[in-house]
Amino acid sequence: MIEVLNSLKYTFHLVFHPFDGFWDLKHEKRGNIKAALAIIAMLCITFIMRRQLTGFIFNLNDPQELNIFSEVISILLPFALWCVSNWSFTSLMEGEGGFKDIMITTAFALTPMIIINLPLILFSNLITMPEGAFYRFFDSLSILWSGALLILGTMVVHQYTLLKTLFTSVLIVVGMAVIIFIGLLFFSMLHQMYAFVYTVYLEISLRM
Amino acid sequence: MFKTIVVLFVFLFLISVSIPARAQEPFFSYTYDYWGEPVAAPHAYLPTERLDGLSLGVGCFRIPRDLFVSDDGRLFVADTGNNRIVIVGEDLKSATVIENFQTQAGVEQFNQPEGVFVTRGGDIYIADTGNSRIIHLDGEGGYVRTIGAPVADIIPPDFVFQPSKLAVDEAGRIYIVATGVTQGIMLLDAYGIFRGFMGASRVTPSLIEIFWRAVATEAQRERMLLFIPTEYNNITIDDEGFLYVTTDKLTFWDINHAISARSRDDRVAPIRKLNPTGVDVLRREGFHPPVGDIDIDNLRQSLLVDVSVTDYGIYSVLDRRRGRVFTYDPDGNLLFIFGGTGGSRLGTFRDAVAIERIGDRILVLDSSRAIITIFDITEYGRLLKDAVILHRTGEYEASTEKWREVLRRNSNSDLAYVGMGMAYMRKDMFSTALNYFRLGSMRERYSRAFQLYRRVVTGQNFGWIAAMLFIPVGTFLFVRRRNGKLTGKRQ
C-alpha cells in the first residue's frame, strides 16, 4: 500500500521531469503495476466525473444518457490496445522495455489528464462562456501534455532515439487499428460459425 | 374487514365509471427538446371542419394543388385536375368558379393550373402550368394579359416553361417557381419581362475548388457552376415583401448533417427567407435548424412543400411526407407540431400539398383526398403564440404570465422556461433565472445570467473569498520562509 502511494506521489515529479522521471520509474523501480492500475482507475473516475459534473455551459452531454460501462471501456480499450501494440512492435525493434514497463509508463504518462481535469471540473462551474477560452486551453493542454509524455516515456523505456520513437508511435497506432480489425473479423467469424451450427441444428431438429 | 374491502371495491368501481371517455384526437402533438428527442406536448391546433367541392356546391375537386387566401378573406383553390380556379367566399359556405376567360382571340381555358396568387389590389395571377403561361385576371375574373415563357440568353432554347407556383410583390414584380428550374426563382418585372434568376445559394468554394479553379482553362472555368443547384417547390410572400421558399430536393444525409451540426446557415436549408436581392435572411437560432422532423430515421426526412406566414413572422411549414405542420417563431424556435398521415379521419392527410391561414385558423389542402381541412387554435396554442408575440413586442411582464400558463400545461416547453428565465433576469433574480435557463437548455443566456450572478455573489462575500484565498497562500509563504531560514542556518 505504502509503495503504491509513494509511487503515485512520484507522478508529480515525473510530469515535470519526464526524462529522469521515466528512467527512474523503470530502473529505480519507482513505479509498480498496482500504481499503474490505480492511475487508470482514477482516470476512468475523472472522465465520468467530468462528464457529469462539468459546468452546464461547457457540458454538452445528455445527463440522461450516462453509461459508465462504455465510459470505462472508452479508456480501458485504447489503453490495452496501445500497450499490446506497443509491446508487439518494440519487442521486434530492439526495445528494452517489457510489457510491464510499457503498462507502467503508459499509465504514468496519462496522469496530466487527471491532474488537470479534476480542477478543471471545478473551474468550469465558475466561469462564463467568454472565458471558455481558458477552459479549452487547459483541456487541450492536458491532452498535449499526456501525448508528449507518452512519446517521451516510450523513448526512455525502450532507449530509442526521438526519430525512432515517432516512427514507432505511428506503427503502434497502425497496429492498434490492425488489432481492432482482426478482433472484428474474429467476432464476425465466430458469429457466422454459430449461425451455421445453429442452422444445421435447426435443419436436423425440424426433419427429425 | 370484509366491509372495508367491499366499500373499497364499490369506491373503485365508482371512480372507474366516472372517468369520462376521452375524445380521441387523430394525431399526437409533440415537440423536440434540446437533445433532438421528440417529447409529448399538448395540442396547439385541432381539426374542426372540412371543406370539399361538393359541400361548396361546385362539384368535387380533382387533385387540387394550391391554396391562397386573399386580403379580403376569400379562399382561392387551384383545382388543377378540373382545370379551374375555385373562389370560396369569406363565410366558407359558398363558392364561385373561374373556368375560362375571354380574350381578344376568344374564350380560353386553363390547362392543369398548379398555382394561384391574388394581389392586395385583387388581381388574380394563375400559373397555367399545362399551357406554359401565367394568366393575369382582374378582380372580377376579366382577362388582363398573358405572360408567356421568359426569353433570355441564359435560358436554353429547348427550355419548357412549366410555372408551378408564383408570388407578386407590391411593385408588381412576379416571382415564379417553375418545374425543372434549378437556378432558383424566375424573376419577372411588372411588364412580364424576365429579369434573372434569384435565390439559389452561392457556392462557397473550398480550398480544393479554389485550386481547381486556378488550374482550369478559361473554357472549363466557364462551365463550373457558380451556384448550388436549387429546385424550389413553393413560394410565399409576406407583408414586408420577404419571400419564403421551400425545397424538397435536399438529400437525407445533408439534412441529417445539418441537424447534428445544429447548422445556422443556409447551405442546407429546406426553408429560406429571401430578401428582395435574393439573399437568405431566415434566422435559425433555435436548438435545431428549421427542417421539419429532427428525429429522422430510415432515410426519410420531412419533405417541406409550403409555408404560411402570420404577422410577427411566426410561420408554419407543411411536411408532405408525414402530413405534419411545423410552426416556428421568427428566431427559428420550434413552437408546435400537429397533423399526421392516416386514413380518412379529419386532421390526417394522404397528400398534403398546401397550407394557408385565415386569422388564427390554419387550412391544409389534401390533394389526394381533394379536401381542405380547417384547424382551429386551442387554448394552449393561443397561450404559446401570445407569449411569443408579447415577448417580441417587449411586454415582458405580460409575457411572463403567459409563459407561466404555458408551463402549467406543458412542462416540456423549453421555450417557456427560457421566457421565464428572461423575466427573472430582468428582475435581477439571477439564481432563479439560472435555474430556468438550465431547464430550457439555453447556454448563452445561462452564461450571461451566471456572469451577473457571480458578480453579485462575489460582491456580497468578498471578505470570505479573500480570506479563503489569502490564508492558504499566506501559510504557504510563511512556511517556506521559515524553512528557508532553517536551511540557511544549516549552511
Image (cartoon, coloured by chain):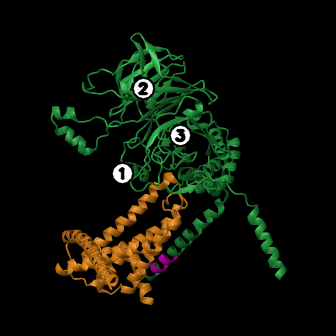
Numbered range of the magenta stretch: B482-487
Q: Is residue B199 above or below residue B249?
A: above
Of residue A54 and residue A23, the one placed in the foreground of this image is A54
Residue at mark 2: B127
Q: Which quadrant would residue B18 be assigned to in this image?
A: bottom right
Seen in the image, is A185 located left or right of residue B434? left
Farthest residue, direction right: B3
Task: Classify mark 3: helix, strand or loop.
Answer: strand
Q: Gap between marks 2 and 1, in whole Å?
A: 33 Å
Residue at x-position 46% and y-position 19%: B100
Amino acid of disc 3: Ser
Left-right relation of B284 to A197: right
For marks 3 and 2, give the one nearer the viewer: 2
Quadrant location of the C terminus of chain B in the rendered image: bottom left
Q: Where does label 3 land, which residue?
A: B316
**Front-most of B64 and B202?**
B64
Q: Position of residue B401 (x, y in %)?
A: 71, 46
Mark before the other along the chain sequence, 2 or 1: 2
Q: What kind of element bears circle 2? A: strand
Where residue B146 sits in the image (x, y, percent)? Answer: 40, 17
Question: Which chain is in green here?
Answer: B
In this figure, which residue is indicated by the disc labeled 1?
B253
Give the residue drawn at x 82%, y 82%.
B2
| Location of residue B74 (image quadrant) | top right
Residue B320, position as x, y percentages in the image? 46, 43
The quadrant of the image that shows the N terminus of chain B is bottom right
What kind of residue is marked 1?
A: Trp
Q: Residue B138 at x, y = what percent?
A: 50, 16
